[in-house]
Image (tube, helix red, strand yellow):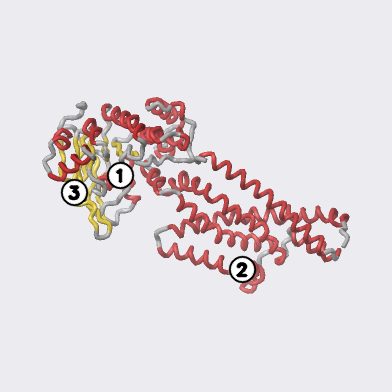
Amino acid sequence: MSHASNSPEATVLLKATGLQKSFGDHEVLTSIDLQIGKGQVLALIGPSGSGKTTVLRCLNGLEIPDGGEVAFDKGPTVSFTSKTTQRQAQVLRSQSAMVFQNYNLFPHMTVLENVIEGPVRVQKRKRAEAIAEAESLLARVGLAEKRDQYPHQLSGGQQQRVGIVRALALKPSLLLFDEPTSALDPELVGDVLRVIKELADEGWTMVLVTHELAFAREVADEIVFMDQGVVVERGHPDVVLRAPQNERTQQFVHRLLNPF
Amino acid sequence: MTVDWNLFLDSLWPITQGALKGTIPLSLISFVIGLAIALLMALMRLSGNAVISFIARAYISAIRGTPLLVQLFVIFYGLPSIGVTLNPWPSAVIAFSLNVGGYAAEVIRAAILSVPKGQWEAGYTIGMSRTLTLRRLILPQAARVAVPPLSNTFISLVKDTSLASVVLVTEAFRKAQEIAAFSQEFMLIYIEAALIYWVICLVLSMGQTRLERRFDRYVAR
């Protein structure tokens, strides 16, 4: 499970500092700092409502934090205020792609059209080239023969693999996963996790919000445990998940590993 | 009462001609322009800007709150008194387009709102702007939802174009009025006109079914 770029000196790809966000009186994020090295896998874990998904969505500006900064090394930097617009945050999205809990495939497009939409319409790549790449990516996840089907004709696991391929087709420097297996039937989870594991082994940089602790331990280089909008504990998976220092982390890990 | 079948058959073509040269093109042109107005108004209402949203709301309210016949009269008989004189056809097209624009705006707005928020987000995360997301992802999905209510709007419009007879546009109903006045067979001719409208609307309903079936190919049944 050690990746080539696992070393602490790995070049920094993304730095988020002081991310802060409130909804009304409720502070959902209190000054979050994150740093992701190139080729690293960072897993965000924590109870629901802890703010982990909000952090993920701040990294591509889907959520506009009230304060803080997201900076890509050799790339765009956005300093947020509550007045930052979606349009201003858009520059961050040239660097990343996202896989959603509910897949969010485009229902009116075939599998292939879903995958090439970004490359062709946004990145202005040649259609034939985008199709060839999409086909080989689909073949990789075992969905080559589904290219002309519509999303509703696929199982949840297949849809999520298409979601992953749609993200990969953009060739982003960062992949964001928002609870990618939470909406899946249990027997379909494995197929999706296997694909994500392969991508991690290939050296893709990713941030993963997940409840699958065993999987997080398997693929992540760093675990960040959040609760009530703050980072409670962070570190190597073996430490955070096996011998957590903080009491809240201990409780959370214990509860997830021993549900009854 | 005996039915004068000869008169019925003889007047079939003139009234149909009125439909082909008046009713149908008037409906089609007004609907297309009206849809463009409606889309603009729907987007204005959805915009975050309070002033822009208010303008659209005022427009929709005015159109829906006043009779179509009055709108027609304002444009054809009213405008000349402030120095704007329009021919019958342009007057009718303007009145019907504005009318469709007001009614269809709410349909389109609701259809846009029916598309899940996740579709906007998916568009943004593949790098799309708001405009591109709207055009490529949201409107095609909204169109599916909007087909049945917009078909209603269109069918209503086809029948409403009979009002254009009062601003001297030669369409199916005006033809019928002329024939009825000449022959004095009011019952026969007006029922004949009604049947011709009915046939047009039946064809449109069939078109609606086909369109719905086409859109349904991408949703689970």
* Quadrant, the N terminus of chain B: bottom right
Can you tell which quarter of the image residue B12 is in? bottom right
Q: Position of residue A72 (x, y in %)?
A: 25, 41
**Which is more foreground, mark 1 or mark 3?**
3
**Which is more foreground, mark 2 or mark 3?**
3
Q: Which residue is mark 1?
A: A60
* Residue plotted at (22% across, 44% down): A46
Question: For residue A230, which numbered disc appears in the image?
Answer: 3
Amino acid on which the number 1 mark rests in the picture: Asn
Q: Are marks 2 and 3 on the same chain?
A: no
Amino acid on which the number 3 mark rests in the picture: Val
- Determine the secondary structure under disc 3: strand
Q: Which residue is mark 2?
A: B67
Can you tell which quarter of the image residue A129 is in? top left
Residue A89 shows up from this direction: yes
Question: Which chain contains the residue that carries disc 3?
Answer: A
Q: Nearer the viewer, residue B44 or B204?
A: B204
Q: Position of residue B209 (x, y in %)?
A: 62, 45
